[in-house]
């Protein structure tokens, strides 16, 4: 039996116990896990050093090494994340609906855990803890497959968490780490129908596309964001500049950052040059349509491929459009159904934009950067769904649950 | 361009219009569709006769020909189904949640259509109309791929519906029928990410498994039901017999019918023989464990394969168990997470069963045959989901929707 089948099977065996735990039992376990991470920080940092060393020798870029690196303060932050999950309301057991039927049946729809959740992610040890915490809080078992370049860190973290769980009501086997560094272990997870109830990929678009295109287990697609901001003719210049600068440059590396600015031609004629200057000051490289290039001499011509690219960087496409219809068409063609914004003082234009754009989050006069579980007030986030089934947009704890109908009868049969 | 890509693309182009239709516009179109089916019943019956003729020549079993056959009364029933969908509440546009954030953002979660729904089904022309009606009512475009032996019927039905839609607010292109009878057209639909938002298979287990195991488009798995009824030691014999006979024999061909009866050994010692006699009178063939065969001389020995089979027929497995734990283990091993029932007078045993069994619908003292959108009061049903993502159990109109966050700001940016 392979490691993947073995560990997923062990995880599955715990689902009955997990589904019946009280919120108090789960919260207590999360706090003990947090404490253990703090207590064993030195061991974890030592294991992390091995990963970093291997990474340096392999010539891994500094930015990736930074995402991999752990120190006392980062471990404290990770432990604090678990404590925050512990204080969130537990969705499991919530009664969602009660139906009384004329034949006397009472049908109650209640929230239950999903079962076993597979998480496939990159070399980010913080995800190991965060995903484990979110899944266990919602009564799910979890099978983690992190990037192989974080294997030493992940192995030590899971060892620490297993030891911590041994004194709690959560079975240690509910948390499994796949250690096989070969791609084949990912491929195996993707086809593990019957043992995994869902797979959630967390990472860049190639990782996500591999999961979406090859999994037979149900997937919650997260991630890729080619987000637009449309500045309408009536947009207030100060607000338009503030929102579009924030959407692009406050943190360009994330999925809810803007990649393309669409500008009404009337707005462009009056304000695009000064806006472009503001982007230049923020070190944002500009690529534009011919209308843009005519107004902004330092903008490079944008290609169709540029409009289809998630830069995650200090690069912005600009396109001048004739109005809302052309903006909507552009977004329908190039958007990834993540986050889209209109800046306008015209409530009719805003209403049309919010109604007609097909995306998880549609904004009127606010930065797309707010698409985030914490900013939405969920207190946690397992990812941002860009698909339409099950969950769409930032996913808090309820996205990690399913439901079940409990039917109470007194001998009813169907006629 | 293939027929599948072409038609799915045409369907997708209508999604913007569909999402913005009023409930009144959609209901009016459904009523006009119903009227057209009645008016053109003769033409449809003539087309259906071609399918039946081809089927007879190909040696299709009578039971399948019966599912394929249309007459005036069946067409009237199908049209009545559309009228019933028209009077159901429209979930699209419902406000699901409103969040007011400290920074002044208002975040509203609203129901929206899924987009384009692919339906893959067998040679049942009634599904063509029913699926079209449910999808259009919820503002979705639909791409239908029915069994090729119903092609003439489906082609005529869709021709009639297209003509009817031409006088309504629903674009005729929102309803597409794939006419290519080759399996390759199904395979193509399964990989149509970007054009189809979800695929719902409706049919037998081999059709469903083909979709689940090969689709890269998100799937809502429906169908297969190996359902159990557990008679506890404290079950009232009269109720136990009524419920288990109904679950098995009222309509054995459907997914919520019982396949295996689990009987507490104390109950078995006293009542199994008379219960088995009742099943014999209902023409149900019995296959049992050694304990069953010892008590019921005419029962054949059941194999492990029998316990894993969805008979959909007048055949029942019986297993005598030592108590609830063994019943739960059996259901965990052989159940398909569809519908499971306990008959007991012991509320503690009932509570444990309803909590611990992992299935879409869990019953205390009522027949599993009630797992059905109409019996649950939903007024419609696109299928019964046996997966845990998105929808579980009978799926009414809300299962055909997604959600979207509309965020109303006044210039907010992220700090």
Image: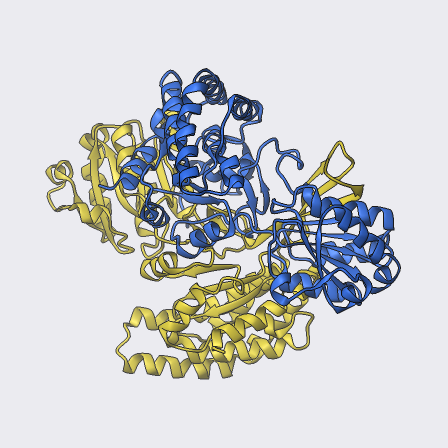
Chain colours: A yellow, B blue
* Count of marks, rendered view: 0
Residue B115 in view: no
Residue pushed farthest right? B270
The foreground one among A228 and B168 is B168
Residue A55 in view: yes
User: In x, y percent, where is residue A373?
Assistant: 49, 51
Q: Residue at x 43, y 75 (%)?
A: A70
Quarter of the image where the C terminus of chain A is located = top right
The foreground one among A227 and B25 is B25
The foreground one among B144 and B379 is B144
The foreground one among B250 and B94 is B250
Where is B231 relative to A229, above or below? below
Where is residue B326, by image quadrant? bottom right
Where is B118 relative to B41, above or below? below
User: In x, y percent, where is residue B247?
Assistant: 71, 46
Where is A158 relative to A329, above or below? below
User: In x, y percent, where is residue B310?
Assistant: 60, 54
Q: Residue at x 47, y 64 (%)?
A: A119
Left or right of A334? Residue A292 is left
Left or right of A58? Residue B278 is right
User: In x, y percent, where is residue B102?
Assistant: 53, 43
């Amino acid at each position: 039996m392979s490691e993947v089948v073995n560990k997923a099977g062990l995880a599955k065996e715990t689902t009955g116990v997990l589904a019946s735990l009280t919120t108090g039992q789960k919260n207590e376990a999360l706090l003990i896990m947090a404490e253990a991470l703090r207590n064993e920080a030195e061991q974890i940092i030592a294991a992390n050093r091995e990963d970093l060393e291997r990474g340096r020798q392999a010539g891994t870029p500094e930015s990736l090494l930074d995402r991999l690196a752990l120190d006392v303060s980062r471990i404290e932050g990770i432990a604090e994340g678990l404590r925050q999950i512990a204080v969130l309301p537990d969705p499991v057991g919530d009664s969602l609906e009660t139906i009384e039927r004329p034949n006397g049946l009472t049908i109650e729809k209640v929230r239950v855990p999903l079962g076993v959740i597979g998480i496939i992610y990159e070399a980010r040890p913080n995800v190991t803890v965060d995903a484990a915490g979110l899944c266990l809080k919602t009564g799910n078992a979890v099978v983690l497959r992190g990037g192989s370049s974080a294997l030493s860190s992940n192995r030590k973290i899971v060892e620490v968490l297993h030891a911590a769980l041994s004194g709690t009501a959560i079975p240690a086997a509910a948390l499994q780490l796949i250690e096989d560094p070969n791609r084949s272990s990912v491929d195996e997870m993707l086809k593990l129908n019957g043992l995994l109830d869902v797979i959630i990929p967390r990472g860049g678009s190639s990782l996500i596309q591999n999961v979406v295109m090859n999994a037979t287990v149900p997937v919650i697609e997260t991630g890729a964001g080619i987000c637009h901001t449309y500045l309408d003719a009536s947009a207030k210049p100060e607000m338009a500049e503030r929102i579009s600068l924030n959407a692009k440059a406050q943190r360009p590396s994330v999925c809810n950052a803007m990649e393309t600015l669409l500008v009404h031609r009337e707005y462009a004629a009056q304000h695009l040059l000064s806006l472009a200057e503001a982007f230049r000051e923020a070190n944002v490289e500009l690529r534009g349509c011919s209308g843009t290039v005519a107004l902004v001499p330092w903008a490079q011509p944008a290609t169709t491929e540029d409009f289809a690219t998630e830069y995650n960087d200090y690069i912005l496409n600009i396109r001048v459009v004739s109005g809302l219809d052309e903006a909507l068409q552009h977004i329908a063609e190039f958007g990834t159904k993540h986050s889209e914004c209109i800046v306008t003082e015209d409530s009719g234009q805003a209403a049309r934009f919010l109604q007609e754009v097909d995306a998880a989050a549609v904004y009127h006069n606010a930065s797309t950067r707010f698409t985030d579980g914490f900013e939405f007030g969920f207190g946690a986030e397992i990812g941002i769904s860009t698909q339409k089934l099950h969950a769409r947009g930032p996913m808090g704890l309820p996205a990690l649950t399913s439901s079940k109908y409990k039917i109470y009868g007194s001998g009813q049969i169907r006629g």
